Amino acid sequence: WYYYTRTNVSSAFPIYCRRRVDNPEAEEVLLDQHAISRNVPYLNVPMCKISPCHQFLAYTADMNGNERYMGFVKEIQSGEIIFKIDNVTSIEWARDGDTILYTQPNHHRRP
């Protein structure tokens, strides 16, 4: 896979995409921040991580501007969000590709 981000002229939000190395004409959109931003008052997506098996996308998002992030895991093929966790500061895949690791802040909002 070849992973990249791009933007549209009409939006400042990035679109996370990928293409197969053996079929570079077929683009697959993994995460369209502009589409998500239409349904929330604010959007910041600081982390996007592809699973080692290339079947899932984990990302964090602040959707109201309070700098408290939700963690999401999206199944790429179906586009379905299969896991959500509130109040996440970072997110990462374990080497097995089935396990997601994340940190949450303490009561002082520190990781």
Image: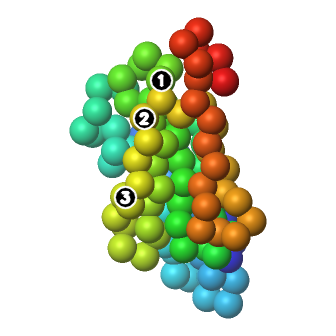
Q: Residues within 10 Å of mark 2 (few under 14, many from 20)?
A: few
Closest to the observer, 52 or 3? 52
What SS does tag 3 mark? strand
Residue 54 visible: yes
Res. 23 mark? none
Q: Residues within 10 Å of mark 3 (few under 14, many from 20)?
A: some
Quadrant including the C terminus: top right
State which tag comes first along the sequence, 3 or 1: 1
Q: As displayed, is residue 56 above or below residue 81?
A: below
- The residues bearing labels 1 and 2 have C-alpha atoms spaced at a distance of 8 Å
Instruction: Tell us which disc is closer to us: 1 or 2.
Output: 2
Residue that label 2 marks:
86
User: How far across and how far down the image is residue 24, in percent?
Assistant: 62, 82
Residue that label 1 marks:
68
Quadrant including the N terminus: bottom right
Labelled pair 1, 2 in contact (Cβ < 8 Å): yes
Task: Point out the residue furthest to the top here.
Answer: 108
Closest to the observer, 100 or 46? 100
Labelled pair 3, 1 in contact (Cβ < 8 Å): no
Residue that label 3 marks:
81
Q: Check disc 2 and give the amino acid type.
A: Asp
Q: Check disc 1 and give the amino acid type.
A: Arg
The residue located at (42%, 35%) in the rendering is: 86
Q: Within the image, what quadrant is residue 50 found in?
A: bottom right
The residue located at (38%, 60%) in the rendering is: 82
Q: Residues within 10 Å of mark 1 (few under 14, many from 20)?
A: some
User: How far across and how far down the image is residue 90, in percent?
Assistant: 63, 37
